[in-house]
Image: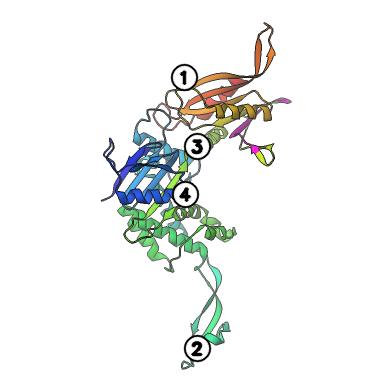
């Protein structure tokens, strides 16, 4: 029987029932431990009789069990269904799913998990490619033929056709759809067939596999994607290949007999938050602002410093630089205290970008808040004779949710208002 668990990042799942009645089987826990070991233990932490999730969100499927890990931006994370919709919207905005492939309403209404969404998008792409006709390429084919074409391979010909004078063992070129790109497309369909629990998607997948002009299977690894040529013939495959890469390279087939197969699509919430903020800023930037991600400068030997975002405002012949670092961390909204490491990081950015206008950006669901703090390493004397710090850093806690409970699509405008007040 299919089971679906939903947890928030940093939550735990163990062999014992939690408040929602969710518990792991020993075989499922073993598969999670094995998967985490092979991925540098970054997706969760092993605890006694269970796991504690980290800041990675997304979905894990082990046999009939689907575990969806959802983001949270406050100490009280809120409604699971609500954050399921927020995650899907973030993935859409950050282009982890094709923006044009599915409507915003369908994102929330039709899909029980992130994995099911990707399955449907992949089937849509595969269906379209088959309808248009799979790309064909030349390849060498060796085998017996009843007519002479290509080059005779005399060794194999004498070995196999000594008493069959009417046959020729040859090697020749053929022009057909049996090539690496279509092999990847087919293996992606087999991965969907292995993992989907939807009768509708299962039926669609079987029909697409049957429609393929060949049915040989091959294990796909990263080097298969790296070898694909970026020619015009395969450009229409790009969306299908991006999803196939995610499915096939995060697919953990059962090694021992009786083990459940496993598939995981997990996203670093810190990187997702950073990209979401970047795209929201670009979407709402006034004409005089330029937003650039990941600008780096030399720091020490081969090391560099690289803030998440550098925003420049040009007014006439002058310009003002703002440095923003996004942090997907939960702060106490009443007494926000960033870590010393985060504050030291922002001080370095101020120095290297010759600015006093930096901001640490945190998520919340408790309404927008801002706090301005000062560094006291460099001061000058004010008109009143008191020391005035030359370096400062603003803390901004911005709501991830809009008033209607959905993802806040106006967050970029809020950030620009903060930057203007900062300057």
Q: Around disc 3, counting alpha carbons within 10 Å, would you say few (fewer than 14), some (14 to 19), or many (20 or more)? A: some
Say which label, 4 or 2, has the lower sequence index. Answer: 4
Marks 4/2: CA–CA distance: 49 Å
Label drawn at residue 270: 3
Marks 4/1: CA–CA distance: 36 Å
Marks 2/3: CA–CA distance: 62 Å
Q: Around disc 2, counting alpha carbons within 10 Å, would you say few (fewer than 14), some (14 to 19), or many (20 or more)? A: few
Say which label, 4 or 1, has the lower sequence index. Answer: 4
- Residue that label 2 marks: 159
Label drawn at residue 335: 1
Farthest residue in the front direction?
Answer: 48
Place of residue 56 in the rendered image (x, y in percent of width and height, measured from the top left): 45, 41
Q: What span is in magenta?
A: 304-318
Foreground mark, 4 or 1, reads: 4
Marks 1/2: CA–CA distance: 84 Å
Nearest the viewer among 41 and 151 is 41
- Left or right of residue 122, residue 283 in this image: right
**What main secondary structure does the magenta stretch of the protein show?**
strand
| Coloration mode | rainbow
Foreground mark, 4 or 2, reads: 4
Residue 73 in which image quadrant? top left
Say which label, 1 or 2, has the lower sequence index. Answer: 2
Label drawn at residue 187: none
Place of residue 123 in the rendered image (x, y in percent of width and height, measured from the top left): 41, 55
């Amino acid at each position: 029987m299919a089971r679906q668990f939903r947890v928030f990042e940093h939550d735990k799942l163990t062999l014992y029932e939690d408040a929602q009645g969710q518990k792991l089987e020993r075989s499922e826990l073993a598969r999670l431990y094995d998967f985490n070991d092979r991925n540098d233990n970054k997706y969760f932490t092993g605890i006694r009789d269970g796991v504690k999730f980290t800041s990675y969100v997304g979905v894990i499927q082990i046999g009939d069990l689907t575990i969806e890990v959802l983001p949270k931006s406050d100490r009280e994370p809120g409604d699971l269904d609500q954050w399921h919709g927020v995650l899907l919207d973030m993935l859409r905005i950050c282009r982890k799913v094709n923006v044009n492939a599915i409507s915003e309403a369908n994102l929330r209404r039709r899909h029980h998990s992130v994995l099911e969404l990707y399955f449907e998008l992949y089937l849509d792409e595969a269906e379209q490619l088959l309808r248009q006709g799979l790309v064909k390429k030349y390849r060498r084919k060796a085998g017996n033929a009843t007519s002479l074409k290509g080059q005779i391979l005399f060794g194999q010909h004498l070995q196999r056709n000594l008493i069959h004078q009417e046959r020729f063992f040859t090697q020749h070129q053929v022009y057909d759809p049996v090539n690496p790109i279509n092999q990847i497309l087919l293996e992606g369909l087999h991965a969907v067939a292995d993992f989907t629990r939807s009768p509708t998607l299962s039926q669609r997948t079987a029909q697409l596999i049957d429609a393929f002009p060949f049915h040989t299977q091959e294990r796909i690894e990263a080097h298969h994607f790296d070898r694909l040529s970026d020619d015009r013939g395969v450009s229409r495959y790009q969306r299908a290949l991006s999803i196939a890469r995610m499915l096939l390279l995060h697919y953990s087939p059962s090694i021992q007999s009786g083990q459940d197969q496993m598939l995981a699509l997990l996203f670093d919430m810190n990187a997702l938050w950073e990209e979401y903020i970047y795209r929201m800023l670009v979407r709402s930037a006034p004409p005089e602002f330029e937003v650039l991600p990941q600008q780096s400068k030399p720091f020490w030997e081969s090391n560099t410093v690289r803030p998440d975002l550098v925003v420049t405002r040009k007014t006439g012949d002058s310009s003002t630089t703002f440095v923003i670092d996004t942090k997907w961390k939960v702060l106490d909204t009443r007494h926000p205290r960033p870590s010393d490491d985060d504050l030291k990081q922002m001080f370095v950015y101020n120095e290297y970008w010759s600015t006093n206008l930096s901001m640490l950006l945190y998520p919340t669901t408790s309404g927008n808040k801002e706090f301005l703090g000062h560094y006291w390493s460099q001061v000058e004397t004010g008109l009143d004779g008191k020391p005035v710090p030359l370096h400062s850093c603003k803390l901004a806690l911005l709501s991830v949710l809009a008033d209607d409970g959905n993802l806040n699509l106006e967050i970029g405008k809020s950030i620009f208002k903060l930057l203007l007040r900062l300057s």
